[in-house]
Amino acid sequence: MKKSKVIVVRQEGERRENPIQISERERFQRKRQEIAETLPCATTLATLAATIERGKPFSVAGAGELARNALMLWETCDRHLKSEIDTRARAAINNEDELEFSGQIVRPKSFPASLADFERLVVPGDNEADRRATYRDFLHEYLRGIENPNGSVGRETTFEAVNTEIERNLNEPWSENFFIVRARKFLEWKKEHDEKTRSARASAGGAAMKVKAAAKRAKLGTR
């Protein structure tokens, strides 16, 4: 099971570190469980609420109505508790992300920043053209996911969205928050992209070795 590595914020010139991530769904479910263990259960909440609300001893005559009210109260408490757990879990994950990915981000010395600052400090590449091409590749995937989480948006639609986004990035100043959030998203994409590339190369290399070995065996068999 993969675990998150917590690292610190740094400025230009400091050493880079690579974060190790787990899936967002797994992180959320794990965080929900942690938060849930710190809060009372819905039954406890309903019992306390019923005691405070009624403040009356139990009677057989009112048992049916009391049971119905208790059930409604339990359902309300259960919904509220689940909503509160979700809210706290998301907040905890956001705080963890700030620590985890900020150590990967070299921030400019002052804000507002620009797209040129972002590409120079965050996007790898030998020159401006290489960095812009890599940033465009990121936006193709990032904007496609925003437009349709199911991934069914066509490349043509995403291509237009990328051009619009780059134009906006060029003309609008980058706040510190926008810079950090965009950098985190880019680094997440870059890590996944690099892993896929390494896996594809390993698979291709293995296939090539098998073909070479088969050819060698065939050549030996003809002697």
Image (spheres, rainbow, N blue to C red):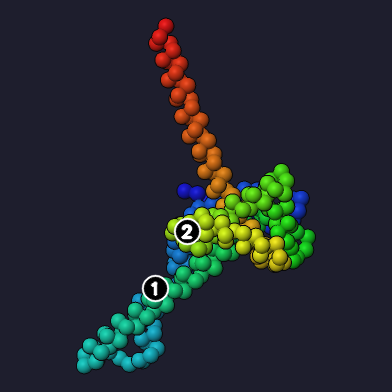
Residue under label 2, please give it: 153
Horizontal side of 62 relative to 33 (left or right) equals: left
Point out the residue furthest to the left here. 61
- Residue 89 vs 189, above or below: the answer is below
SS for dot 2: loop
Q: Quadrant of the C terminus?
A: top left
- Placement of 19 over or under 205, stated as above or below: below
Q: Quadrant of residue 98?
A: bottom right
The residue sitting at 52% across, 56% down in the picture is 156
**Camera sees residue 204:** yes
Amino acid type for the residue under numbered disc 1: Cys
Decide: few, some or many residues near mark 2? Use Cα within 10 Å; few <14, some 14-19, many ≥20: some
Identify which residue, 137 or 52, lies in the foreground.
137
Where is residue 45? Give x, y as percent: 39, 79
Residue 179: x %, y % from top left: 67, 62
Dot 2 and dot 1 residues touching (CB under 8 Å): no
Dot label at residue 41: 1
